């Protein structure tokens, strides 16, 4: 026994019975206050979350996940716990339980429908080509057309006398198209594929450039562009959506054209010697700015300023112009016959104009060069035209984009009517400035 007043070690941390009773009373008071607060602030009508909670409690109690005392009704227990009437809980439980059961049965996993379409590699390739051909001609393509195509190619066999067999095959075709990733409707975005002729021109151009690089010849990139008087690159001006009296924007205005050429670096010498005229730079004597229509759209007059280089230009119509003395489609028949005699082409006296012109046009396309090529060859140049839809192979196009951005930045805060030709001509320094000093960088990327 311990002396009077002494306690075991740790006895001072244990609460007395009076403290236990007071703490339990405090918890009971807090619980009663919480229930009273909830009952006073919640609505009488059951909300959707409360309905779902009652349904979950009923399901768990009925499935035995929560043990109950003997002879305790599930409805009474839930009503007591949630402080709701027994009738409300019982009525809600019956209706919600039936609804949940029906929805559960409706979403039961069903057997996956068989796909009677043989998804072979050849069949998938043929279907894709079939869709491409119809898209190029704007022909409407649906699952029924795909099914008919596969029947013609012996990928499917359908009994035409049995409508049920036809419908089943159509449903299988739709499932195949859906699983293959095909969609129906208008395609978003823009896409294009080069024609065979343009692909051939691109390949020929690349082969020529490979030979030029192997021969270490210098290349001159010549091009022309234009900018309108009211040109602007911004699209963030203020406007009033409710203003119904707004007028249409003014016309683009006069067209100001500019022509220039840049020359690539000389690869036939070492890097240490490649400076000055041997580095990539702008040919200043080729720069010209004029108003559209006041001068012909041609760059042939600038070919006399450079000697013995490979000149690259785009395939604009006025670049590939042929001599005006050649016969045209609307030339008289006697002149076409004379042209056949000049070109040593055989013909009969009864041949019509269309027959004569077909022979002459084929000969001109093969044997007569554009004026630009003849002028270049007479001075020791070679002229190559960039293939269609490949402006990225022309570095000067990137420079034109920078030039237009510089000019637009100068006039972005002014009125459209204040943009005069003198303003743009004053920006000629932009062409001669730092924009063209980066030509070497653009050419090296190419």
Image (tube, grey):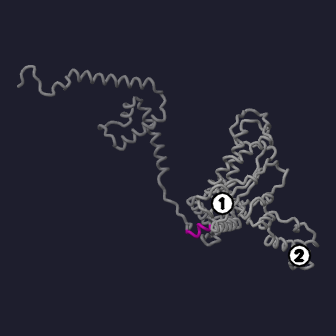
Residue positioned 19% across, 26% down in the render: 14
Q: Quadrant of residue 143?
A: bottom right
Q: Toward the viewer: 116 or 288?
A: 288
State the quadrant of the N terminus: top left
Q: Is residue 274 left or right of residue 342?
A: left
Decide: is 28 above or below 261. above
Q: Does residue 121 belong to the magenta stretch?
A: yes
Res 148 seen here: no
**Does 76 sit above or below residue 376?**
above
Image quadrant where residue 61 sits: top left
Q: Position of residue 126 (x, y in %)?
A: 62, 68
Category of crowding for the residue at label 1, using alpha-carbon neighbours closer than 10 angstroms: few (below 14), some (14–19), many (at least 20): few
Q: Measuring 30% from the left and 22% from the top, which residue is drawn there?
A: 26
**Label 1 secondary element:** loop
Q: Residue at x 57, y 61 (%)?
A: 180
- Residue toward you, 251 or 269: 269
Assess whether mark 1 and mark 2 are in contact (beta carbons under 8 angstroms). no
- Crowding at label 2, few (<14), some or many (≥20) Cα neighbours within 10 Å? few
Q: Earlier in the sequence, mark 2 or mark 1?
A: 1
- 298 and 268: which one is in front? 268
Query: Relative to residue 141, is residue 356 drawn left or right?
Result: right
Which residue bears the numbered disc 2?
Answer: 342
Callout in the foreground (2, 1):
2
Which quadrant holds residue 334? bottom right
Left or right of 98? Residue 15 is left
Residue range corresponding to the magenta coloring: 120-126
């Amino acid at each position: 026994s311990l002396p009077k007043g002494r306690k075991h070690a740790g006895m001072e941390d244990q609460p007395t019975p009076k403290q236990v009773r007071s703490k339990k009373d405090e918890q009971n008071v807090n619980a009663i206050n919480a229930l009273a607060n909830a009952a006073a602030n919640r609505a009488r009508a059951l909300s959707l979350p409360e309905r779902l909670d009652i349904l979950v409690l009923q399901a768990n109690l009925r499935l035995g996940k929560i043990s109950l005392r003997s002879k305790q009704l599930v409805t009474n227990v839930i009503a007591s716990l949630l402080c709701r009437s027994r009738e409300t809980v019982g009525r809600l439980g019956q209706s919600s339980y039936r609804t949940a059961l029906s929805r559960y049965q409706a979403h039961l996993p069903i057997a996956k429908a068989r796909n009677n379409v043989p998804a072979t590699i050849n069949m998938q390739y043929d279907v894709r080509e079939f869709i491409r051909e119809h898209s190029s001609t704007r022909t409407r393509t649906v699952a029924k057309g795909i099914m008919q195509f596969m029947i013609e190619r012996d990928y499917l066999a359908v009994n035409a006398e049995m409508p049920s067999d036809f419908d089943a095959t159509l449903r299988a075709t739709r499932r195949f198209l859906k699983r293959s990733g095909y969609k129906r409707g208008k395609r978003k975005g823009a896409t294009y594929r080069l024609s065979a002729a343009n692909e051939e021109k691109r390949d020929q151009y690349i082969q020529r450039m490979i030979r030029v690089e192997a021969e270490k010849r210098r290349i001159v990139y010549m091009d022309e562009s234009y900018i309108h008087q009211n040109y602007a690159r911004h699209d963030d001006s203020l406007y009033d959506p409710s203003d119904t009296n707004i007028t249409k924007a003014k016309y683009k205005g006069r067209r100001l054209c500019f022509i220039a050429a840049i020359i690539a670096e000389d690869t036939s010498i070492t890097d240490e010697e490649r400076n000055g005229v041997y580095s990539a730079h702008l040919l200043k004597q080729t720069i010209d700015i004029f108003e559209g229509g006041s001068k012909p759209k041609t760059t042939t007059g600038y070919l006399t300023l450079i000697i013995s280089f490979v000149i690259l230009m785009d395939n604009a119509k006025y670049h590939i112009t042929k001599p005006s003395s050649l016969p045209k489609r609307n030339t008289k028949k006697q002149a076409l016959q004379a042209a056949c005699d000049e070109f040593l082409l055989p013909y009969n006296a009864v041949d019509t104009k269309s027959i004569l012109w077909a022979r002459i046009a084929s000969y001109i396309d093969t044997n007569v060069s554009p004026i630009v090529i003849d002028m270049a060859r007479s001075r020791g140049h070679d002229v190559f035209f960039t293939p269609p839809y490949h402006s990225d192979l022309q570095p000067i196009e990137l420079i034109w984009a920078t030039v237009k951005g510089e000019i637009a930045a100068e006039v972005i805060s002014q009125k459209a009517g204040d943009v005069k030709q003198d303003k743009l001509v004053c920006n000629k320094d932009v062409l001669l400035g730092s924009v063209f000093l980066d030509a070497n960088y653009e050419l090296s990327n190419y």
